[in-house]
Image (tube, grey):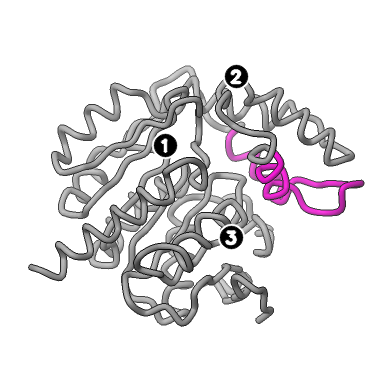
């Protein structure tokens, strides 16, 4: 266990013995539901750093926040079997991490792949989910959006410097994220890459890209409507980037039909997936959690 001013690093073993990592913020906070943060496909716990600080130190109800690195990302070990990079295995890893931390239930925030994992967790252990925040994800994934992700993961060269990384990321995503500041882009790049400014490397197993290469995007992708229906009783906030290519506005409308109590936020000037530390999002997420926990306690 290593310490930081805002969090400590927690290492635990997956069900198959692989060493996995999570960041824990606000360890002593016990006044509300803990928050479990699940990142996107190639992302890691660092994506949630600023939001986790807000939720653990600045919110009306300071909460314990756990941000996970899936296997093959961040400080978690790479898996020698690429077939284990799937949402079912990763969902089991999250449950193992919760058990290791002594957490039985909590509020879940899932960005992109993290939201898919939450769908699976609902089928595996629904009582563990007290509230959900989906960040630009739902039961329907647009093939064009997935093709865009695959294209830039396969085609973007590895930058040699921080400046090159900034240029590469803005080139790939800039038109979808016109609302971001220079500081926002800098934080994103710092979270995505590891190493010094000279000699950066993406902080994920390169074999993850192979899992996308196998997808036939000329055919309709499987949907998760049955899994989404299972979440109908769970308070849900769905956040969508106005420029998202992965979560369509039509799917968001359908989600509300299936889950009438669902709250929604559309983030102008951002695509897939909105930066949760920007604008009013931290305050809106904190307020959502407070409202739903109060309602739960009144039952």
- What secondary structure is found at the residue carrying circle 2? helix
Q: Quadrant of the C terminus?
A: bottom left
Q: Is residue 211 magenta?
A: yes
Q: Is 64 situated above or below 251?
A: below
What segment is highlighted magenta in the picture?
186-212
Q: Residue at x 24, y 41 (%)?
A: 263
Residue 40 left/right relative to 99:
right
Give the Cα distance between marks 2 and 1.
17 Å
Residue bearing mark 2: 175
Q: How many marks?
A: 3
Q: Is 294 situated above or below 263?
A: below
Q: Is 149 situated above or below 228?
A: above
Picture coordinates of residue 187, whole percent (x, y): 67, 46
Q: Which mark is residue 69?
A: 3
Q: Earlier in the sequence, mark 1 or mark 3?
A: 3
- Eye-nearest disc, 2 or 1: 2
């Amino acid at each position: 266990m290593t310490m930081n001013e805002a969090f400590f690093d927690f290492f635990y073993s997956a069900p198959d013995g692989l060493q996995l990592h999570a960041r824990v913020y606000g360890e002593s906070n016990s006044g509300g539901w803990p928050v479990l943060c699940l990142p996107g496909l190639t992302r890691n716990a660092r994506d949630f750093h600023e939001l986790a600080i807000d939720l653990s130190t600045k919110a009306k109800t300071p909460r314990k926040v756990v941000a996970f690195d899936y296997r093959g990302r961040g400080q978690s070990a790479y898996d020698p079997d690429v077939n284990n990079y799937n949402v079912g295995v990763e969902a089991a890893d999250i449950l193992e991490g919760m058990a290791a931390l002594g957490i039985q239930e909590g509020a879940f925030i899932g960005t992109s792949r993290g939201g898919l994992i939450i769908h699976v967790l609902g089928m595996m252990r629904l009582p563990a989910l007290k509230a959900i925040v989906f960040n630009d994800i739902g039961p329907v994934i647009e093939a064009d959006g997935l093709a865009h992700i695959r294209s830039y993961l396969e085609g973007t060269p590895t930058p040699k410097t921080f400046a090159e990384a900034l240029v590469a990321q803005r080139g790939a995503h800039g038109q979808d994220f016109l609302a971001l500041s220079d500081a926002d882009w800098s934080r994103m790049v710092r979270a995505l890459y590891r190493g010094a400014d000279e000699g950066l490397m993406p902080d994920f197993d390169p074999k993850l890209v192979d899992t996308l290469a196998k997808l036939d995007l000329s055919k309709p992708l499987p949907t998760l409507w049955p899994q989404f229906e299972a979440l109908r009783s769970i308070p849900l906030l769905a956040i969508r980037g106005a420029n998202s290519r992965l979560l369509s506005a039509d799917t968001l409308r359908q989600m509300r039909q299936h889950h009438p109590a669902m709250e929604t936020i559309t983030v102008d000037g951002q695509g897939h997936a909105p930066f949760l530390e920007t604008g009013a999002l931290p305050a809106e997420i904190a307020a959502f959690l407070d409202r739903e926990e109060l309602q739960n306690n009144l039952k």
